[in-house]
Amino acid sequence: AKGKAVFTAAGCGGCHVFKDAGGAGQVGPTLEGIGSQDTATLVEMIVEPDKTVAKGYSKGIMPPNFGDSIPKEDLDALVAYLQQAGK
């Protein structure tokens, strides 16, 4: 529940499709199926979004400050949520 709340509060659904959280954004790639990613990869995708960019998307679209604006405990909850709900 906490991870879903972080997803919503951080505005992730404004850019990403993620049905479990009601995300319907079209700016970023869909997060459906993201649960197959390991923890370290998901953290990197969130805190260093320009390091690895999904095919068909450009660098500089996702805000680069989530590593600073999302506390570690919340980031951990978000990643766990994405892994569980994104299967």
Image (tube, rainbow, N blue to C red):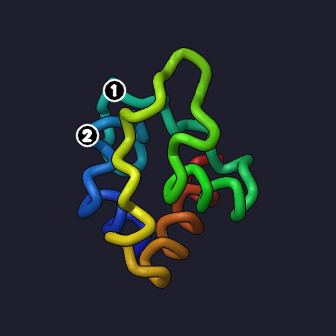
What residue did someone put label 1 on?
27
> Looking at the image, which residue is at 38% across and 41% down?
62
> Looking at the image, which residue is at 51% across and 39% down?
31
SS type, badge 1: loop
Whole-number angstrom distance, CA of label 2 to CA of label 1: 8 Å
> Relative to the observer, which residue lies in front, 80 or 69?
69
Whether tag 2 and tag 1 are in contact, CB under 8 A, the answer is: yes
- Can the viewer see residue 1? no
Residue 45 percent coordinates (x, y): 57, 50
- In the rendered view of the protein, which quadrant contains the N terminus? bottom left
Residue 84 percent coordinates (x, y): 61, 60
Q: What label sits on residue 64 in the rendered view? A: none
> Looking at the image, which residue is at 60% across and 61% down?
43
Q: Residue placed farthest to the bottom in the image? A: 73
SS type, badge 2: helix
What residue did someone put label 2 on?
14
Residue 40 percent coordinates (x, y): 71, 63
Residue 48 percent coordinates (x, y): 54, 53
Given the image, on which type of amino acid does mark 2 rest?
Gly
> Relative to the observer, which residue lies in front, 14 or 86?
14
> Looking at the image, which residue is at 36% across and 59% down?
65
- Quadrant in the picture for residue 56: top right
Q: Is residue 34 above or below residue 58?
A: below
Q: Is 73 situated left or right of 27 in this image?
A: right
Q: Across the whole image, how many numbered discs are drawn on residues? A: 2
- Can the viewer see residue 18? yes
Given the image, on which type of amino acid does mark 1 rest?
Val
Q: Residues within 10 Å of mark 1 (few under 14, many from 20)?
A: some
Q: Is residue 69 above or below residue 83?
A: below
